[in-house]
Amino acid sequence: MNTAPQSRREDGRTYSVFIAGASDCDELRSIAKRAFEDHNFVAPSNDRKFAVFDWREDKTPGYAGEQFQEQVFQDAARLWGKEECDIFVLLLWYKFGEDTKREYDAYMAKRADGSLPHFFVCHYNEPVPPLDLMDCKIDSLFEWITQHRSGWAELDPTRGAVNEIVAYQAALYKRINSFLSEQAD
């Protein structure tokens, strides 16, 4: 269940956040969602909040294929009260596929005001579990990253790749705080 604010507040700003990534990134996704929700919890009187959409928890059940992805976009828009996200979090590992590419294309397009959303990306650099090697799409992932990475605000100095969850978590909290500082200026 999503505990983030469900709409814009009259007295402040709620930033819409979309977390994209295949099921192999569940641990990274949980940490990302928690980081944004922690801000909402720790600073309840703050007028800047995050409305986080996590397709694993927040989508309407019962859709598959092309309908599934369209329903994800509709459910996110319903949560935010608009179709554009303010922050797009892209989590990548070995099950990288077409749905993640569609989310990137949909949310990284220019918004109505001509700006792009703020963008956080993390490539999990852990070894692929042996049982999943048959389904591994690492080669296509690296090719896609190479084609798209210019201008990315990656979460650590090694161009976004992390080996340790603790390093990822620290980088994510730091990036969220930097984002909030930028918005205050």
Image: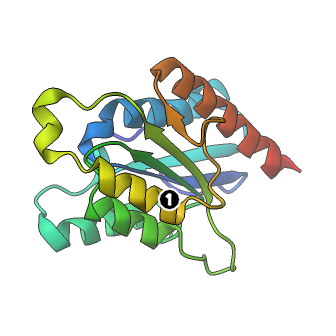
Q: How many marks?
A: 1
Which residue is farthest right? 185
Report the side of 137 relative to 146 (left or right).
left
Between 103 and 158, the one nearer to me in the picture:
158
Asked whether the viewer can see residue 82, the reply is yes
Crowding at dot 1, Cα within 10 Å, few <14 / some 14-19 / many 20+, comes out as few
Residue 1 placement (x, y as % from top left): 32, 39
The structure residue drawn at horizontal position 44% and vertical position 71%, both measured from the top left corner, is: 105
Report the side of 6 relative to 184 (left or right).
left
Q: How is the model colour-coded?
A: rainbow
Residue bearing mark 1: 146
The structure residue drawn at horizontal position 62% and vertical position 52%, both measured from the top left corner, is: 14
**Amino acid tagged 1:** Thr
Between 40 and 147, the one nearer to me in the picture:
147
Q: Is residue 101 above or below residue 13?
A: below
Asked whether the viewer can see residue 5, the reply is no
